Amino acid sequence: MSGSSVLFDAPGPRARVRNWIATGVTVLVVALVLLYIGVELWAKGQLQWAKWEPFVTPNVWENYIIPGIEGTLKAAALSIVLAGILGVALGVGRLSTHAWISRPCAVFVEFFRAVPVLIMMIFAYFLYSKYNLIDSEYATLAGVVTGLTLYNGAVIAEIVRAGVNALPRGQSEAASSLGMRWGQTMRSILLPQAITSMLPVLISQLVVVLKDTALGVAITYPELVSQGQNIGASFTNYLPALIFVAILMIVVNFALSSFAVWLEARLRRSRRGATPLDPETIEQEGAPGAKVKLAEPGGTI
């Protein structure tokens, strides 16, 4: 029983053979497809070294790739911070016992969850540009950050609300019985636990924010994808440029995910209680070296 799975029955000999055959056929089909794509790209000259050579030159890195990475990370960092603040505020507001707070927050969240991010970016960019609300140098950055902040803030608000509602109801009832106000209960008891349980979902949302910065290409924001298009236009190697940009985005997203997972593990460790004392011998306070043996249940010391 120890070796059996609780999810499905262990496959028998015939099932294992069928699984191996299906796996082999799948691998073969994928390999053939990749081979066909490679042959076609080679025949069209897309895999020639001349198409990839620009990516090993300092000029391309200094003028295109590094500025693109900086633009992507800048927009993502600002959006993550602002969306986190907005999301927590809206999530707590939706949980408020006062209707004049919870209802406007609910309307805000539902509205900006329904509007596409790209439309919000374009609207914000033209709003800032037309009325000179922000210096033209930063209008595209502001448009990208505004769209990402509003959308992801609404999503994080729902994550916060779901995380708090998932906690046992008895905790808030116990806090209320102790005379704690709603705000004290939320700040001291519910939110710390909810944030810990929400970390995996929040991490995935951070990756979404980073990827969605690529939508800034629609308003000419100089992020990584738009810089890849500029490389393709300059060196007539659009496909290699986009492949290279895709690899860079994967690397950046993997680095962000790895950091977020490390931070999650660290936060979870920091929230653990102190190491339990040895029930056999506890050092008596004020008398170093003196040991006090605990009494057995129903007995005496």
Image (cartoon, grey):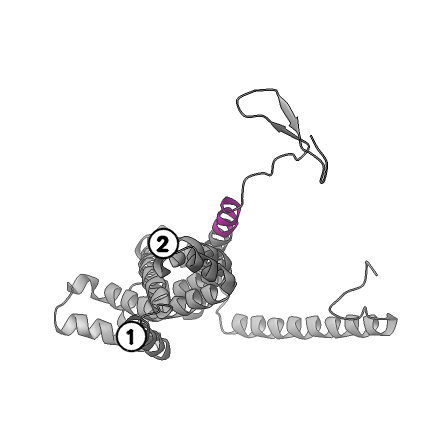
Q: Quadrant of residue 228?
A: bottom left
Query: In this orientation, which residue lies closer to the viewer: 21 or 270?
Result: 270
Number of residues whose C-alpha sits closer than 10 Å to that of mark 1, classed few (under 14), some (14–19) or many (20 or more): some
Which residue occupies 31% across, 60% down?
82
x and y, in percent, of residue 211 in the image: 41, 65
Q: Quadrant of residue 33?
A: bottom right
Query: In this orientation, which residue lies closer to the viewer: 273 or 236?
Result: 273
Q: Nearer the viewer, mark 1 or mark 2?
A: 1
Among the two numbered marks 1 and 2 on one chain, the one whose residue lies closer to the N terminus:
2
- In the rendered structure, find residue 61 and report the number of the disc placed on it: 2
Quadrant containing the N terminus in the rendered view = bottom right
Query: In this orientation, which residue lies closer to the viewer: 46 or 9?
Result: 9
Magenta extent: 262-271
Under mark 2, the amino acid is: Trp
- In the rendered structure, find residue 104 and report the number of the disc placed on it: 1
Q: Is residue 203 above or below residue 23?
A: above
x and y, in percent, of residue 74 in the image: 31, 57
